[in-house]
Amino acid sequence: MNIRAGKIIYERAEKLLKELISIPSLSGEERVCADALSGYLLEKNVNVIRSGNNIIALSKSFDHGRKTLLLNSHIDTVAPSQGYTFDPFVPREDGDSIIGLGSNDAKASVVSLIETFLFFENNDYLDFNLILILSAEEENSGERGVSLALSGSPQIDCAIVGEPTGMKMAVAERGLIVVDGVAMGKSGHAARGEGINAIDIAIEDIMWLNNYNFAKKSPFTGEIRCTVTGINAGKQHNVIPDRCTFMIDIRTNELYSNEEIMETLSKNMKSELKARSLKHKSSSVPNDHHLVRCAESLGVDTFVSPTTSDWMRMNFPAVKMGPGDSSRSHSADEFILKEELSEGIERYIEFISNLKL
């Protein structure tokens, strides 16, 4: 059986990608993009279910007695970087590149998974079900994203999460805790050396954080990494600031719970610390899972991803794999190569055709 997608599908995918780039879909503002994708799938006679700004599609031969593979990627984007040299919502071509906001992260994955899903709708030879979920609010970890979509979906056995990985397979990914810190001092006149400088307290805590190492290092996701990514204090040059705020990005491993990490920091730092969420856990798939075995049989490279995704919101085995390069994500003049887009479709089809559940 011919499992190649073909030129017509590649051209259709490029056209759809450009259309999606032209529709602003910042996190929480995905309705118009979701409408466009719903219309696209309905034109192809796909049964579409809307859950907020999430799109759910079940294969036409769906059978509750069979195993089910989820194909998922997100339709939302971050806000465009100020470094863009053109309107980020007007897609451009430069040689073999399609340039625009979300082209790489993750609308190329969205388009590739859509065309993969449609391929199997037209070539129904799988012995398991496919569910396609195009989710909202991934970039801002919103409550009305993939978690909402999954709450109303049939039972899922495993998933492929579409993110830019160069079509390599992430078999684990770090978790994430974003922490807001507040150091409290006492205001006073700078000329007289009065008060207690909140900046000094924050610096002391930050230095401790920079020098502290969590003892357990994972063979999969490595060590826990804490990075201060923002700091703010003071409004006037001659006033000792009584408040200094800072932000910590923590990339976790599976050997500590997020609660344990926060307890350790709170015991050792003077500043008040508050996690924005403790739900963003580290994720991994067993080495002997069908998804990993299929990757091995096809010679697909595997790796551990330093970035998070909607995988962390899934309570079933999953992997992360999609066209593009993670280093381009959230950057100015973001782009995807046409070759990467077509390769994404081909390799998704090949992988799913060889997968045994």
Image: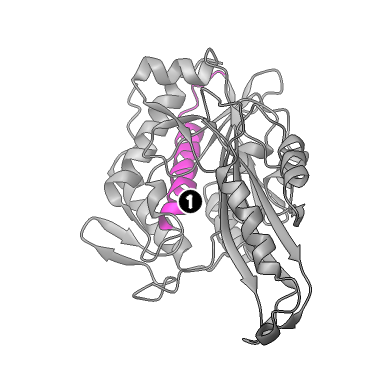
In the rendered picture of this protein, how many numbered marks are placed on residues? Answer: 1
- Which percent across, then down, holds residue 200? 65, 65
Tag 1's secondary structure?
helix
> Where on the picture, by quarter, is residue 131?
top right
Q: Which residue shows up at 48% across the image and 51% down it?
A: 106
Q: Answer with left or right where residue 136 lies relative to residue 278.
A: left
- Which percent across, then down, holds residue 127? 55, 18
- Give the vertical position of 325 relative to 14 (above or below): above
Badge 1: few (under 14), some or many (20 or more) residues near its Cα, within 10 Å? many
- Which percent across, then down, holds residue 153? 73, 37
Span highlighted in magenta in the image: 103-127
For disc 1, the marked residue is 106
Residue 300 lies in the magenta stretch: no
- Which percent across, then down, holds residue 84? 38, 72
> Where on the picture, by quarter, is residue 313?
top right
> Where on the picture, by quarter, is residue 158?
top right
Residue 280 seen in the current view:
yes
Q: Which residue shows up at 57% across the image and 23% down it?
A: 285
Residue 278 seen in the current view:
no
